[in-house]
Image (spheres, rainbow, N blue to C red):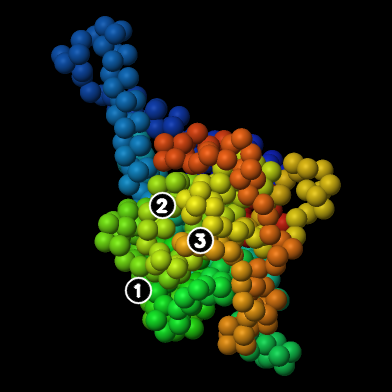
Amino acid sequence: MPVVATGAVLLSESLGLIVGPMITGFLSCHTIVTVLSYAIAMNVEQIDLSKSVGTSDIASVAVSAGSLGLFVLLERKVGELLPSVLGVSQHLNPLNLQVVSSLALGAAMPQRQNLFYATVVLANLVALVSPQGSGPYSLSVANAGLGAQDWTLLARQWSNTGYISVLENKEQRYRLLRCDHSLLGGEWQLTPERRKQGWQVSEPIYAVFEMLEAVRLLQSERPVSDKDAQALVIGLGIGTAPKALMSHGINTTIIELDPIVHRYASTYFDLPQAHTAFLSNAIPWVQAQSKLAPKYDYILHDVFTGGAEPLALFTKSFLQNLRSLLSSNGIAAINYAGDLSLPLTSLVLNTIDLAFDRQCSAFRDQAPPPSSQADGPAEDFTNLVVFCRNAPGPIEFRQPREADLLRSQSRRQYLLPNPDLAIEFPLRSSSQSAEVLEDGDVGNWRAQQQESAARHWRIMRTVLPSRVWELY
């Protein structure tokens, strides 16, 4: 399976987003069902079931159906369990699980002794040298291939949200945190050459994370000092925004589902230790905290990962619980990555707007593509930051001071949201102005989530070389 997948995945881009994974999955994974069926049939033949179920055709069908039902049940239960287990150890990854499956299958086959020994040899060879494995040579093999693309793989591990890795571009000297087929963030490294150009700190590669920090700049009748402020950050990434909040002396609490993301943000992107971290699902955490009523002056909500937003964190009930955690003059900044041409994005924006009594303003992180301005509903995938007040009042920002910039050149340009990139809430003045995303509606939008993920996939294929996406 891993050998075939390594070869088949190279065709994924030319075959496309739909056909590529289907063929790769069929060649490397689904074909094992045929072999597995043969092994089961051979073993069942050796068991005399006639005394228990009889010899009729109906009895045979019943045995087959029962076996299939048991297989489907076990497959589903194991599938539910795996995400919570994968982050425990770097050795718990798909390739090693394939090796275990191969050994089990080899042991179950007729003439099993010779086949089992052969499988052991092949499985160990694959586990040791495969670029996707966790063997002693796997990382070296992976970097040998990546070196031709000027990339180095620093760390990787499968976890409860997917495949997490840290990559560094050797030529342009920037570092990325990857989750599956998306990037959670990255930084341009502070090199001696860049110091000569006036750089003083590493700079983030995405402006949207600096825009989130503008919660500190929003004008308020009763502003709170940084040393007295409390901040809640939901979704960590590489930690650009929470790191800035901590640098200003703000007491910061972070909610992050994936422990590997938190570990890599600390190890490879200098996330300070001066914070409180809860490595858990934000939905039950926020619900529980809403009953205890802690108060935060700032809440940052940034949960994009793997190609699509987790809609459960944008429902009316979740956002209302989140708002209940704000102080009376508190401010929330919510990042939503989506396509403005899709109705789902309009619905999510309207849900945010209504959850905060229409006391919100939204800003893009970059100008729309020319086609979306001229042709109307063309694809327009972008990062949006929605700023919302807990108390009535306008969304107005003070001008950044030098201390707000944290010696960063990019913050000088991107920290303050650009009024020219402000967008209207699509449903605010329409006949659908009361429509919101409820908990029970999440599954109904799966098709549009898939379409949004497909558009994001095409964008990501222009960001990094195909070899980086496909094998590492």
- In terms of secondary structure, where does tag 2 sit? helix
Which numbered dot is residue 276? 1
The residue sitting at 56% across, 57% down in the picture is 360
Q: Does residue 156 appear in this view?
A: no
Q: Is residue 76 visible?
A: yes
Which amino acid is tagged 3? Pro
Whole-angstrom CA distance, mark 2 to mark 3, is 16 Å
Quarter of the figure with the C terminus: bottom right
Q: Which is closer to the viewer, label 1 or label 3? A: 3
Which of marks 3 and 2 precedes in the sequence? 2
Spot occupied by residue 461 in the image (x, y as percentages of width and height)? 69, 54
According to the image, label 2 marks what residue? 320
SS type, badge 1: strand
The reply to whether dot 1 and dot 3 touch (C-beta < 8 Å) is: no
Q: Quadrant of residue 382?
A: bottom right
Identify which residue, 26 or 258, lies in the foreground.
258
Looking at the rendered structure, which numbered label has been put on residue 392?
A: 3
Q: Earlier in the sequence, mark 1 or mark 3?
A: 1
Tell me the amino acid under the disc marked 1.
Answer: Thr
Q: Position of residue 442 (x, y in %)?
A: 47, 39
